[in-house]
Image (cartoon, grey):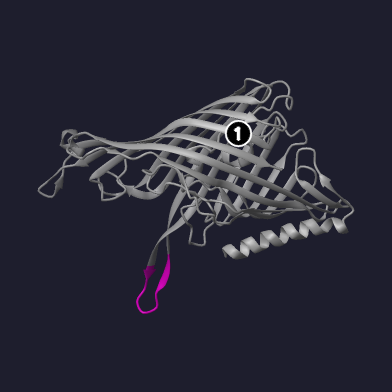
Amino acid sequence: MRKSIQALAVFCLAAGMLLPTWAGEAGKAEEGAFFIRQGEAFSLNISTLLQVRADYNDDEITFSGPLFDGVPDVDYDSQSDFIVRRARLRFFGQAGAEWLSYMLDVDLASRSLPAGDMLSMPSYSTELSPELQDAWLRFRLGENHSVTVGQQKDPFDYFYQEYSRDQMFVERPYISDEPFAPRRQVGVRYSGHTTSNKFGWDAMLSNGNGTGSLGNDNDKFAVSGRIYFQTPGFFGSGMTALPGTYQGLRYGLGVAAHNNKVGTTMVCQGGLAQTCGYDTDTLSGFEVFGGLAGTRARINFSWQSWSQDDAGYNAAGALDQLQLDSYTVEAGAWVGSRSELALRYESSTTDPLDTLYSGELQSEFETTGVTAGFNYYFKGNHNLKLQVNVGQFKLTADDALEIIYGGAKALADGDFIRGRTEAKSNFIRIGIQHAF
């Protein structure tokens, strides 16, 4: 599969280089991709995104409370890495008609490894692993409406909607890489907006088992949608305020929802002739998002609330849902014609839940992250920039182990043994980005 994707990318690139021999027009946009056009019905745009990163991490885990009495703290040796974070090759344009467009986006570099147990630090593989990002056809229905079919971004999660090239920090917030974040899905997405472009909306029906899901093996679908109002063009303009590009005060505010009926455990019923299917656990999220931008400064925020059915046990030993609330706020201000200072704070918390046993061990998780950033734009835009991020990511687990007397569970708070696990990662990330 990996060699097939590489061969496809090389073939498309070679074909793109040969097309000018017969195409009517070819060149490079002022701040965009190389393009080839034949009238209004056909065009091929070729763009790339290369992000190379140097990392330094200093991690430690500390234990406290009677539950962890005698458990030694862990201080990891610091680690340094170089990784190719992204190496994107994109082909897009008109597919033979003015009302039909296409996108093919392949990432030839490392893929993310999001935490699966809520105790791992965010990390990324250094292995080169080609992965299909976008592959879709878009049908334009009039001036203000379109339907997109194929693998594409789910409309949930504000920070994920904006292109990775245009982010204020080297990485998106932690919540955007969690296993239940929908990210890209295969399905159908309808998008529309008013004539003034002040109000817009998106709705998507997908398989629910795309690049950012816990897995969905049943025959149910995932549904997502969002509505928003904005100063025209605010959403989709990136996460920073580029000097000289935008004037005056701009803003945007919206809400989004996601529901995925995830197929989990295989269940079979019947005697000799059995009927088998999957238990269905509903995974749902709600988001409030938006931002405010001036000529040289911008603020972005997102608040998300997630729930997952039967993710663990309550104190009585019955199946219970996971409830997680998260918010992120980031701000950036330009301090020169090409320099930007940025600050981000993010936090998420869960309700008490036992994910391992049957109610005896209740755990509340909390993550916090603080990141300070400096960005230098060599050309005054995102096409060539240097990013330096310094910060700390912290995850804490407050545990309460219930004492059992003679097979009966205790009811009083004094019959719990409590403990706290705190994992910290101090990091420095230096990224260089080139795009065209």
Q: Residue at x 60, y 28 (%)?
A: 291
Residue furthest bottom as drawn: 272
270 inside magenta stretch = yes
For the question of whether residue 162 can be seen, the reply is: no
Along the horizontal axis of the image, is 98 left or right of 6?
right
For the question of whether residue 295 can be seen, the reply is: yes
Q: Residue at x 70, y 29 (%)?
A: 380
Q: Position of residue 272 (x, y in %)?
A: 36, 79
Q: Residue at x 62, y 32 (%)?
A: 239
First to last magenta residue range: 268-277
The N terminus is located in which quarter?
A: bottom right
Query: Could you say which is closer to the camera, residue 352 or residue 21?
Result: 21
Tell me where residue 11 sits by quadrant: bottom right
Q: Is residue 150 above or below residue 415?
A: below
Q: Within 10 angstroms of label 1, few (less than 14), some, or many (20 or more) residues? A: some
Reading the image, the residue beneath label 1 is 386
Looking at the rendered structure, the kind of residue marked 1 is Leu
